[in-house]
Image: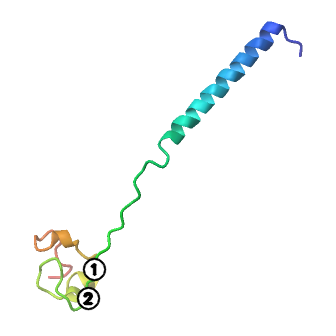
Amino acid sequence: LLRTPEEEEEMIRAYQWRKRKEQAEMRMMGAGAGTEKPQQVIRREKIGRNDPCPCGSGKKYKKCHGAGSPPPSSSGKGNGSSPPASA
């Protein structure tokens, strides 16, 4: 393919423009990398099977939420937000 000097110059400018655009996009994608806070690990004290259930029902944990339902959060203690699995 034979190109005129003007066509060659135009191709070079187009190539350079594409390269700059790609580099700018890469910088934009990488700008937020590493700025996220690491997730905080919440450790809860293990509830014993014979301890009172933290939902506030007065039942033993093994008879209330320990019977297959997920354990209630300690912040919901006594407000009835987590009903017992079996009444």
Q: Is residue 34 left or right of residue 67?
A: right
Give the residue at x 82% y 8%: 5
Residue 10's disc number: none
Give the residue at x 89% y 13%: 2
Residue 28 in the image: above or below residue 42: above
Using the rendered view, name the quadrant where residue 10 is placed: top right
* Real-space Cα separation, disc 1 to disc 2, in angstroms: 9 Å
Of the 4 image quadrants, the one containing the N terminus is top right
Give the residue at x 32% y 69%: 42
Of the 4 image quadrants, the one containing the C terminus is bottom left
Give the residue at x 10% y 70%: 79
Label 1, secondary structure: give it: loop
Q: Is residue 84 left or right of residue 12?
A: left
Using the rendered view, name the quadrant where residue 41 is placed: bottom left
Residue 72 in the image: above or below residue 17: below
Evaluate if marks 1 and 2 touch, with contact meaning CB atoms under 8 Å apart.
no
Residue 19 percent across, percent down from the top left = 67, 27
Label 2, secondary structure: give it: loop
Q: Which residue position holds label 2?
A: 48
The colour mode here is rainbow
Residue furthest to the right in view is 2
- Give the class, few, some or many, for how many residues have Cα within 10 Å of label 1's Cα (few <14, many ≥20): few
Residue 77 percent across, percent down from the top left = 14, 73
Q: Which residue position holds label 1?
A: 45
- Give the class, few, some or many, for how many residues have Cα within 10 Å of label 2's Cα (few <14, many ≥20): few
38, 7: nearer the viewer: 38
Q: Amino acid at mark 1?
A: Glu
Q: Amino acid at mark 2?
A: Gly
Residue 49 percent across, percent down from the top left = 25, 90
Residue 82 in the image: above or below residue 2: below
- Mark in the foreground, 1 or 2: 1
